[in-house]
Amino acid sequence: MKVALITGGSRGIGAAAVETFAKNGYTVILNYNNSKSKAKALQQRLLAENCDVHLYKADVSDIAEVSAMFGYVSKYFKHLDVLVNNAGISCTAQIQDVTEAEFDSVMSVNAKGVYFCCKYALPVLAKCNGTIVNIASIWGVRGASCESVYAMSKHAVVGLTRSLALELSDFGITVNALCPPMVLTDMTSGYTKDEMSAFCADTGTPIYSPKQIAQQIYDIALSGLNGVVAE
Ligand code: NAP
């Protein structure tokens, strides 16, 4: 049995990743925080298609909840083949308007959450030469005007990926990151068509669907690569 845990699996890219891994025969642990009904609906739809999907509620910015989540994985599944650190939140504002609470919340979910999910997943990943896929962003490798906290948190994810790729190879664990540009999800639903066109022109990137990014996550998880930060 191959097991994958996907954080933020209730919506957007994470939900598409849950579906991709589940339909490829993985037992999937779908982590959600607030969107219980969406998580449940996705689970029910996939169970009806003979997939194996389990729900686990945890706020990835809460270390006690993260520790308990990987305790649950260890107890019921024994090992973990793939950890996808996908849960994330955005913040669009100029630096002079960003509050301490907004700063803390973005860094807690996007950087601290990824860090401690990696830490607490280690014992179960090490049992099977598991792999970690961190979802960073194009703003994890480039600067983003009016998204400085978000970009900072995603640069942290890239730094963590490169560091753990070196540090965890002794455990047989590989660590890679994906840096998607614009993906059509709730996170980007506030963008107008003109803003999307400007984004594509400025970055030289196309717009992706969650399903396309989910396939990239799946492909990099199975690639055997280590330390890759894929734009
Ligand atoms: P989304 O549609 O807004 O979904 C965000 C997901 O993260 C939800 O499932 C949400 O779960 C979960 N989440 C948020 N805070 C959480 C917490 N504290 N604990 C656990 N789960 C939490 O976002 P998305 O566009 O799919 O983004 C997914 C990832 O891709 C993020 O890391 C984002 O930064 C990155 N990304 C997105 C884009 C883009 O253009 N959309 C581009 C590059 C990178 P609940 O609803 O259950 O709370």
Image (tube, rainbow, N blue to C red):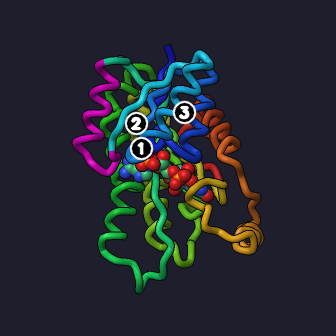
Looking at the image, residue 68 sits to the left or right of residue 2; the answer is left
Location of residue 200 in the rendering, given as x and y in whole percent from the top left corner: 74, 67
Looking at the image, residue 194 sits to the left or right of residue 157; the answer is right
Mark nearer the viewer, 2 or 3: 3
Lower sequence index among marks 1 and 3: 3
User: For residue 99, which quarter of the picture?
Assistant: bottom left
Name the residue that disc number 3 marks: 42
Residue 43 lies, with reference to residue 177, above or below; the image says above
Which residue is most to the top? 1
Residue 220 sits inside the magenta stretch: no
Name the residue that disc number 1 marks: 164
- Near mark 1 (Cα within 10 A), the count class, few <14, some 14-19 or many ≥20, is many
At a point 47% along the width and 68% down the height, the residue shown is 91
User: For residue 70, which quarter of the picture?
Assistant: top left
Looking at the image, residue 38 sits to the left or right of residue 59; the answer is right
Residue 69 sits inside the magenta stretch: yes
Q: Amino acid at mark 1?
A: Leu
- Please, what secondary structure does the residue beneath circle 2 have? helix
Residue 173 lies, with reference to residue 197, above or below; the image says above
At a point 44% along the width and 41% down the height, the residue shown is 7
Lower sequence index among marks 2 and 3: 3
One can see residue 70 in this view: yes
Q: Amino acid at mark 2?
A: Leu
Location of residue 170 in the rendering, given as x and y in whole percent from the top left corner: 39, 31
At a point 53% along the width and 61% down the height, the residue shown is 140
Q: Are marks 1 and 2 in contact (CB under 8 Å)?
A: yes
Q: Amino acid at mark 3?
A: Leu
Count the numbered circles shown. 3
Name the residue that disc number 2 marks: 168
Q: Which residues are magenta?
A: 59-75
